[in-house]
Amino acid sequence: MRSTLLVLVTLIPLAMAAIVLADGHAEEATSGQAVFETSCANCHTGGFGGFFTGAPDIDDKDDWESLTPKGVDGLTATTIAGIGKMEPRGACANCSDADIRAAVEYMLKKSQ
């Protein structure tokens, strides 16, 4: 009985700490630049991926001229759904909607 109580007294605070830490981690926002560099740059920097997909180059204002009016909300929705040769979520299965939105905001800002 005493060992069971000792285990419970030890495990309950550890479990609570893990929940608090996990919750705080889940709320951390990923920067748009970081998401772009890890998930979008291959196709959106005019390189090999962009050549085959036709993805707008982040450094080419003309590529973004027709996209900019869609705004962050429209482009985020398009990225989540996928379009043309771009897979849904931009092929970033680990990206949350917030991550995708941050990447879209970053690309729009950089493309101006």
Image (cartoon, rainbow, N blue to C red):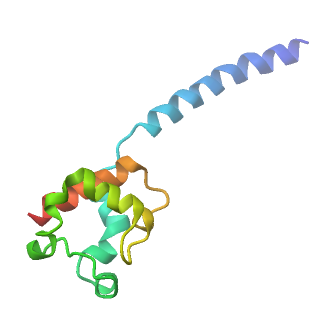
Q: Quadrant of residue 107?
A: bottom left
Relative image position of residue 83 (x, y in whole percent) = 36, 70
Q: Is residue 43 left or right of residue 10?
A: left
Q: Is residue 12 left or right of residue 55?
A: right
- Judged from this view, the residue extending furthest toward the right is 1
Q: Residue 32: tell me if it is visible.
A: no
Relative image position of residue 72 (x, y in whole percent) = 22, 52
What residue lies at 57% left-to-right and 29% top-to-bottom? 19
- Residue 71 lies, with reference to residue 50, above or below; the image says above
Q: Is residue 110 left or right of residue 41?
A: left
What residue lies at 26% left-to-right and 55% top-to-bottom? 74
Q: Quadrant of the N terminus?
A: top right
**How many numbered tags mark residues here?**
0
- Residue 73 lies, with reference to residue 1, above or below; the image says below
Q: Nearer the viewer, residue 87 or 98?
A: 87
Relative image position of residue 48 (x, y in whole percent) = 32, 86
What residue lies at 18% left-to-right and 66% top-to-bottom? 67
Q: Nearer the viewer, residue 22 or 8?
A: 22
Q: Quadrant of the C terminus?
A: bottom left
- Residue 44 lies, with reference to residue 15, above or below; the image says below
Relative image position of residue 69 (x, y in whole percent) = 14, 59
Q: Residue 94: tell me if it is visible.
A: yes
Q: Nearer the viewer, residue 2 or 36?
A: 36
